[in-house]
Amino acid sequence: MTDILNPRDAADVEAAVQWALAEAKTLEIVGKGSKRGIGRAAQWDLSLDLSGLSGVTLYEPQELVLSAKAGTPLAEIETLLAANNQELAFEPIDYGPLFGAPGGGGTIGGTLAANLSGPRRIKAGAARDHFLGFAAVSGRAETFKSGGRVVKNVTGYDLCKLMAGSWGTLATMTDVTVKVLPRAETEATLLVLGLDDAKATQAMSAAMNSPNDVSGAAHLSAPVARRVTGADRAVTALRVEGVAPSVTHRMHSLEALLKAFGALATLDEATSRPFWRSVRDVTPFAGDDRVVWRISTAPSRGYEIAAAIGEGEYFYDWAGGLIWLALGSLHDGGAARVRSALAGNGHATLIRAPAGLRASVAVFEPQTQGLAALTRRVKESFDPKSVLGPGRMVAGI
Amino acid sequence: MSVKMPELDQAVLARRAEIVAALQAIVPGEGVIAHEREMRPYESDGLTAYRQLPFVVVLPETTDQVSQVLAYCHANGIRVVPRGAGTSLSGGALPLADGVLLGMGKFNRVREIDFGNRVAVVEPGVTNLAISQAVAHEGFYYAPDPSSQIACSIGGNIAENSGGVHCLKYGMTTNNVLGCEIVLITGEVLRIGGKHLDAEGYDLLGIITGSEGLLGVVTEVTVRILKKPETARAVLVGFMSSEAAGECVGKIIGAGIIPGGMEMMDRPAIHAVEEFVHAGYPLDVEALLIVELDGPAAEVDHLLARVEAIARECGSTECRVSTSEDERLLFWAGRKAAFPAVGRISPDYYCMDGTIPRAKLPLVLKRTRELSEHYGLRVANVFHAGDGNLHPLILYDANKPGEPERTEEFGAEILKLCVEVGGVLTGEHGVGVEKRDLMPAMFSEIDLDQQQRLKCAFDAKGLLNPGKVFPTLHRCAELGRMHVHAGRVAFPDIPRF
């Protein structure tokens, strides 16, 4: 059992990293552990548990900013925002269900460190696009900050971008500031029924290329759709959000645009919300133990890549540009198949897999030699002794 | 105005003829400019108060030439200043007397428009507006729209992470770029991102965007393009105080409305603009808001009614909704011409670019007025009100002894004030040389050292655009040094389980 360090504040975090440096120990940075099963399976000497650094420290709805300690539960932040009709517009996935855990388990720090997003990624961006500033302790045990608490800032390098998606391997964030936005008053979803993947891609593209401000575009084949809608029919789903008159208008406009593709159905606000939560949280693949891949590619290519993989069960988000793929037992978790089908046109991440598999195949998309070398130098510039989560993303880094 | 630049490399200066010949061998014909008269147009960028003739100007046309030029400079320890269209307002492209000025203007082709994936692949010298024009026939556009969009290049936009009047709703450059090809100072060519979303490892594209030409030279860019909203309408709202206007902005956002654009001008700016553009701005108000809503007509009308109600609640004295596309564009023509308009009422002006928490606006304007009296220099304010990005324009005369210096001091005081109230030194113009020496007002030495260590990961010899962004340059070896006190750090007093 790994020792766990439980810092109470940012000074404790600095002391812990200082100690680890001096003793040549490695640290796993963890919030609530809701995404612990993601990333390469590596061994670390101790866990640095940031859940003690908790609490919203600044929230100014009219300025669209919120600051919190890194270990603040995401659920607490989402509840606070909802009370003010605001939200994190990047719609972060809740990985709980996929990993057989209850939902609502993550922290704001983990959300940012993993650069989470959801169906609204295509319109509103990912965590990276809403991350305004932070304070962190580097692998040199130095506390530094970057960014600010205003929504528009270009002062110095945008280190928030690097922290987003670094999975705790560059620095340990202690305080973060994010941009928050008004929550849409209402939403509705148009379903096109019974399309195959190629036709669905065309339908989603037509919707995205219309001025209807679509904020979610997903396609679920019949067996996958059944687990979400209960009906045994493929659905191509297009979400619009906003004020009621606008949602009504845009739904009509989408209906006119897409009726030639197939039969249509509508989800009102009450049924649209849980539908998109299922897409966001990949619930069709919850509750089993298949390997799950997350593949990001050009939207027009998604269905070709899925066909080239030719195995397993999958569905599409991001207008076809995000493939969630569940595979049965293949000796390498399907890594060779997935990567050769993708052929460098995007990236594939092994999200859910047994530790043994995550130790033996590349979890994140392998990089070209030049990018890998640059990645290593970037890591060294923050964490020269590889104290912070070494090997979580790339072996030896 | 002057700023201390890195000490000249005499060895490089002494080898000028040889270096020029070597560069000519890489970029033949007119691609190398070495005569003083012909280099003169490159001596400054949009921040004309700072001037320096470059060592030599190189205008490559291919990625391979860029790679060879950089590799040569790297091998020979020669500094390089990348330049896009030269519209930087922070001196980001200010040349160095011992540095190659690498002009990217010949990279001016749109390589691919892919409507199926809603992206355009362009060369870095393509202007911001040209991207929108290239996709306009299908009703698309590129969202970030800095006021210099006719002239500024997308490569420069990446360097500065440029914004514009629509970025509260549609994001800055960093939120609208998907991929790039970049050449490191070693000459190594890397491709990052593409037509897909998000990075496969560390978000290097995110760090390159806004790095002010210090990390690499971008040779191709993939940007997202958006379908134009069905309609857009703007409303002009006048107030008798900037406090009331600021309150109105807060209430609009508080009501859950994110307008496509929300701009504010103070009295001096309104008058300068109206005289110049005749946009129909009211002249008897202290503050003017332009609020633009875009989307389907049903949405725009619905929200406009709400905005008008909020404006009345906040004591607006005038509220005029555009009734035609021409009128909407006229409202904007005024705002977009604010800088040149101010340029007409003063021999020179100096544009500042701080961001503040919006609630601090009345305080910042009051202190700015006090400083204006103290320095004896007039100020006009234009303000991206939605996101708190303030552009005070200081009016001065460069020919009056002492005025440029007083102006610079005044500007620095305003920016320090922005930081003091919880804001930042620059919202969209970049640090460049202009705000370089103010960086310690916002960042500690540790903060700046960490940023410079990242620079070392890209450019270990510090040859790309030195003298910009960082007030003090350190050698990478020095920055990398670690003081680990093995065995002397007690186990920290932290709870363990």
Image (cartoon, coloured by chain):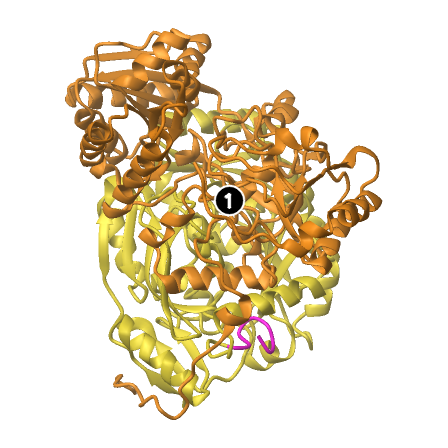
Chain colours: A yellow, B orange
Instruction: Give the magenta part as a residue range.
Output: A390-397
Percent coordinates x, y for residue A31 in the rendering: 36, 71
- The picture places residue A369, in percent across and down from the top left corner, at 71, 66
Q: Secondary structure at mark 1?
A: helix
Give yes or no for residue A392 being in the magenta stretch: yes
Q: Is residue A312 above or below residue A231?
A: below
Residue type marked 1: Thr
Q: Is residue B126 visible?
A: no
* Disc 1 packing (10 Å; few <14; some 14–19; many ≥20): many
> Which residue is at the front of the view, A392 or B393?
B393
Residue B23, above or below B491: above
Left or right: B117 in relation to B423: right
The residue lying toward the viewer, choosing from B138 and A301, is B138
Q: Eyeballing the image, is A174 above or below A280?
A: below
- Residue at 41 percent across and 47 percent down: it is A155
Q: Chain of mark 1?
A: B
- Taking the image as shown, residue B139 lies to the left or right of residue A82, namely right
Identify which residue is drawn at 60% across, 65% down. Answer: A375
Direction from residue B368 to residue B106 in the image, left or right = right
Looking at the figure, which quarter contains the C terminus of chain A? bottom right
Give the residue pinned by disc 1.
B174
Magenta stretch: helix, strand or loop mostly: loop
Quadrant hosting residue A70:
bottom left
Residue at 69% from the left image edge and 58% from the top image edge: B74
Residue A219 visible in image: yes
Whether B324 is among the magenta residues is no
Q: Position of residue B382 (x, y in %)?
A: 33, 26
Residue A366, position as x, y percentages in the image: 66, 66
Given residues B339 and A82, the one toward you in this image is B339
